[in-house]
Image: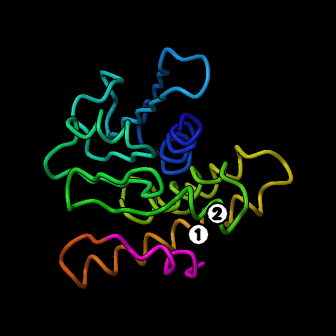
């Protein structure tokens, strides 16, 4: 989650040219605990680097969704990893199985965050797809560029399908996992 926030901040600030501030925090556990990354974006200089009310919440776990959903603005966008978030607090949420896609398509759970970044770039105008791809490729270890580019594209394709389903039904449904896995 932390690396995802760093990559997102770099994409927005370096490649899209907006003002950005990124902060991170960890739970008290030594390993396996919760983590949180906040990315503040503005067209003007940023006075305070902490998020007060969220316009976007990307929850990769049920605990994160439960803890941070109350901070989401009423018209904010909720995106969840439906692999782990099974109790979604609103019908107005995009549910994409990022971790399941990473396991089944790439045999590498570690790319779930990159898949989620691809979806985020597709579902919100906060960052361009070009900027996210540039930031991802600048950050990933040498030799993993193709894997990460493919994961990013898988997230974008999954989000396109989720967006199309939402537009057709005027509600945000969960896209069948089989459809998402076949879409890339």
- Categorize mark 2 by other alpha carbons within 10 Å: few (<14), some (14-19), many (20+): many
- Categorize mark 1 by other alpha carbons within 10 Å: few (<14), some (14-19), many (20+): many
**Residue shown at the point (65%, 51%) measured from the top left:** 136
Is 20 in front, or is 142?
A: 142
Q: Secondary structure at mark 1?
A: helix
**Residue shown at the point (25%, 40%) measured from the top left:** 69
Bounds of the magenta segment: 174-184
Q: Is residue 165 above or below residue 56?
A: below
Residue under numbered circle 2: 151
Q: Is residue 79 above or below residue 37?
A: below
In percent of width and height, residue 124 lies at: 36, 59
Which quarter of the figure has residue 81?
A: bottom left
Please give the label number shown on residue 154.
Answer: 1
**Residue shown at the point (56%, 55%) measured from the top left:** 99
> In this rendering, would 178 be left or right of 145?
left
Which quarter of the figure has residue 123?
A: bottom left
């Amino acid at each position: 989650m932390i690396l995802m926030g760093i990559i997102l901040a770099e994409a927005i600030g370096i490649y899209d040219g907006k003002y950005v501030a990124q902060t991170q925090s960890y739970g008290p556990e030594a390993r396996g605990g919760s983590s949180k990354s906040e990315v503040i974006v503005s067209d003007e200089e940023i006075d305070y680097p902490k998020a007060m009310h969220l316009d976007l919440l990307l929850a990769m776990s049920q605990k994160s969704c439960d803890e941070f959903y109350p901070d989401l603005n009423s018209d904010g966008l909720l995106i969840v990893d439906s692999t782990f978030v099974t109790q979604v607090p609103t019908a107005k949420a995009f549910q994409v199985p990022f971790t399941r896609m990473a396991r089944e398509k790439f045999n590498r759970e570690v790319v779930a965050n990159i898949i989620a970044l691809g979806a985020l770039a597709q579902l919100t105008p906060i960052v361009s797809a070009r900027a996210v791809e540039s930031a991802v490729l600048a950050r990933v270890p040498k030799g993993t560029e193709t894997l990460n580019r493919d994961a990013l594209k898988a997230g974008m394709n999954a989000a396109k399908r989720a967006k199309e389903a939402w537009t057709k039904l005027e509600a945000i449904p969960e896209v069948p996992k089989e459809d998402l896995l076949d879409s890339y």
